[in-house]
Amino acid sequence: MLGFCSSPRFTEHQTTLAHPERPDRIRAIWTALREAGFIDSNPFPDFSLDLGPLPKAKHKAVELAFGPAANKWIASVHTRRHIEYVERMSLLGGGILDQGDTPVGPESYEIALLAVGAVLRSCDAVMKGEVKRCFAAVRPPGHHADPDRPMGFCLFSNIAIAAKYLQQAHGIKRIAIVDFDVHHGNGTQACFEDDPSVFFCSLHQHPHTAYPGSGFDWEIGVGPGKGFTKNIGFNPGAGDDEYLSVIETQVIPDLEQFRPEVLLLSAGFDGHKDDPLAQINLTEHGFERITRALAAQADHHCHGHIVSVLEGGYNLHALGRSVVRHLIGLGG
């Protein structure tokens, strides 16, 4: 059984008018999943997006209710200074947190807490057996947020907080995070690079050619975490076959060796060939194939337990169609 965790309130995180990480991303996902038959709810009746023919869901997803995360879970990853900075900027009415690309509005701090809340609710649903896997369609995204600074559209590291929550609230000892966003998950890596209990693998466009300029193959972790970080950079133009080959020959063997108890996915869809922010040529079918390959590993090691969390994806048509394929790949 597949869970879906999202809220129309995620549109209340306001970025600038031309910003690629915009509220319509949530509207596009909700529209696509409703048209594919995964959900029935329609909180955006006035939003229209022609997605063309979509594959149909075999079963409905379970829509999960949730609230904002408690501050202690944000503090499990981020410094007090970081948290207070985001809160203060929102209370002041908004502004730019990073070097021009991470704007916030008056509601952004509250909505960022709600995004983490959705991810933690997804973890609870999976661990308690309410659903086998869950997809959290949230914004703002998280995988660029360092422990001490927001960056790259990201305020709090949703996926890293989820890993800490699974360890502390559910007693999970080995967690794998696979990040297939087109940009390196530098924030997630910073959270766990010295932690051997979390295996982090990032598949991204080569750092010489893409933001944030990190994620080289020699970045493998430090101290006791050395060997538990893996970075795989793809040259511009790489597509479905290149990604699947790397997953089969490198990622799956590493997961086999690590034997995680839960698999977390940083699900970025900005590697799609139509996305404006990168030069990777994945298709929505490719995202389904990637998801199926990773889901098979979760079935083998984790009782099928997967929590998938939205990261990037900025072409609305490609995003909506790719998320549908992702949920089909998760087993929906």
Image: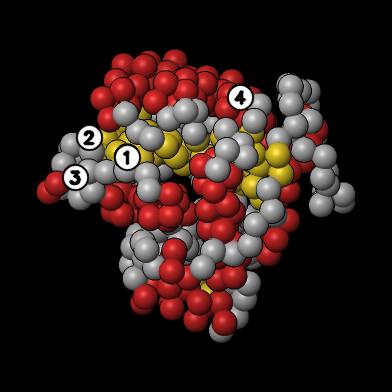
Residue picked out by circle 1: 174
Q: Secondary structure at mark 1?
A: loop
Q: Position of residue 199 (x, y in %)?
A: 30, 38
| Marks 3,1: beta carbons within 8 A | no
Please state which amino acid type lies under the numbered disc 2: Asp
Residue picked out by circle 2: 217
Q: Quarter holding the N terminus?
A: top right
Q: Nearer the viewer, mark 3 or mark 2?
A: 3
Please report whichever mark, 2 or 4, sits nearer to the chain's N-terminal start. Answer: 2
Crowding near pointer 3: few (<14 within 10 Å), some, many (20+)? Answer: some
Crowding near pointer 2: few (<14 within 10 Å), some, many (20+)? Answer: some
Please state which amino acid type lies under the numbered disc 1: Arg
Please state which amino acid type lies under the numbered disc 4: Gly
Q: Residue at x 65, y 57 (%)?
A: 66
Please report whichever mark, 4 or 3, sits nearer to the chain's N-terminal start. Answer: 3
Q: Secondary structure at mark 3?
A: helix
Q: Secondary structure at mark 4?
A: loop
- As measured in the structure, the alpha-carbon distance from the residue carrying label 3 to the one carrying label 2 is 15 Å
